[in-house]
Amino acid sequence: MCNKEKIKLFWEDYTQLHPQVADNYEAWAFGDNPQMADELLDLVIRGIKTGTASNYEVYEVSEETLPEIGRHSILLDGHGNPQAVIVTTNVQITPFDEVSADFAYTEGEDDRTLESWRHEHEKFFTRESLAFLKKPFKPKMKVVCENFKLEYTKS
């Protein structure tokens, strides 16, 4: 069974438990490699990670839709298999160097401090900016700060 079929069946399982949900979702994985996807997914499932940050400019260039409150997402593991459903609860666009300590804590990574968040996310956004946007990281870059709640996990 291909991953698209697995994702569709996973969504069907979720909507059987939540029939009021519209048939509208996105499926994606955290990070830029399978190991990172698995590690961050594990933090979500354990209830530690309730936030994620992304580069605003990537949405513009790829013509992707920004996250919206109430959006359902299927989280994929590092192999592209569906593992969880989250619902977006808050979205703010903030310059990288103005992201708050409170938001950094919700990301659930490392020691959960703003200093650690900035260090790790600067490395990630530098890789992404150079690879995808062909430009260097800038401290004033816009960051999409998204919070979510875990709604469903694979049993």
Image (tube, rainbow, N blue to C red):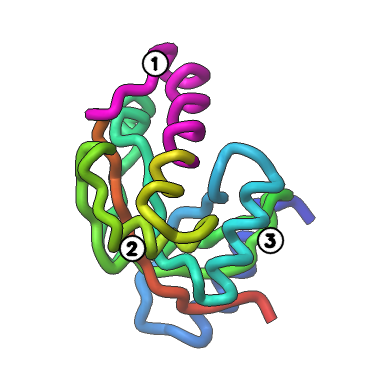
Residue 122 among magenta residues: yes
Q: Secondary structure at mark 1?
A: loop
Q: Dot 3 corresponds to which residue?
A: 6
Distance of label 2 from label 1 (alpha carbons): 26 Å
Residue 1 among magenta residues: no
Choose top left, top right, bottom left or bottom right for residue 64. Answer: top left
Q: Are discs 2 and 1 less than 8 Å apart at CB?
A: no
Q: Are discs 2 and 3 less than 8 Å apart at CB?
A: no
Give the mark, 2 or 3, whose residue is nearer the N terminus: 3
User: Which mark, residue 147?
Assistant: 2
Front-lying residue, 89 or 105:
105
Q: Which residues are magenta?
A: 120-140
Q: Secondary structure at mark 2?
A: strand
Locate residue 13, reporting x and y percent.
Answer: 59, 78
Q: Dot 1 corresponds to which residue?
A: 136
> In the shown orientation, is residue 141 left or right of residue 30?
left
Q: Residue at x 53, y 78 (%)?
A: 152
